[in-house]
Amino acid sequence: MADSTITQQHPLAGWDKPDLDLSSAEWRSSSEGRGDVEIAFVEGFIAMRNGGRPESPSLIFTPAEWGAFVHGAREGRFDLT
């Protein structure tokens, strides 16, 4: 007999970011247009989304998290090649 237990989704422990209304966000993409990543600055947070699928979920960063991400990207920490 299959397990009929329903698993509920719970917020991540320590998640302290608000549910932002991104419907009127001004999304920006790279000036070079090499990728589909777009960012928007909303209510003191930075939202990132896939510009090719804008209906998909956005990642939300605090300014400190965004700074660490940008610093890591500049150092090549996320290069996949």
Image (cartoon, rainbow, N blue to C red):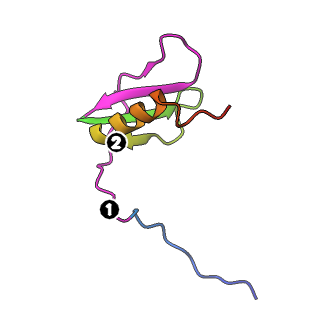
- Relative depth, front residue between 4 and 27: 27
**Looking at the image, is 55 positioned above or below residue 32?**
below
Q: Amino acid at mark 1?
A: Gly
Which quadrant of the structure image shows residue 67? top left
How far apart are the two marked residues, 2 and 1, measured between alpha carbons? Answer: 14 Å
List x then y, in percent, for residue 13.
36, 65
At a point 47% along the width and 30% down the height, the residue shown is 75
Q: Residue furthest bottom?
A: 1
Residue at the spot of label 1: 14
Residue 47 picture location, percent across and down? 38, 35
Q: Secondary structure at mark 1?
A: loop
* Quarter that holds the N terminus: bottom right
Q: Nearer the viewer, residue 56 or 12?
A: 12
In the depicted structure, whether residue 3 falls above or below residue 56 = below
- Residue 58 higher or lower than 70, as above or below: below
Residue in the foreground of this view, choosing between 6 and 32: 32
Residue at image location 44% in from the left, 34% down from the top: 48
What secondary structure characterizes most of the magenta part? loop
Specify start and end residues of the magenta stretch as a single range: 13-42
Q: Is residue 60 magenta?
A: no
Toward the right, the furthest residue is 1
Does residue 4 appear to the left or right of 50 in the view shown?
Answer: right
The nearer-to-camera label among 2 and 1 is 2
Which residue corresponds to mark 2?
65
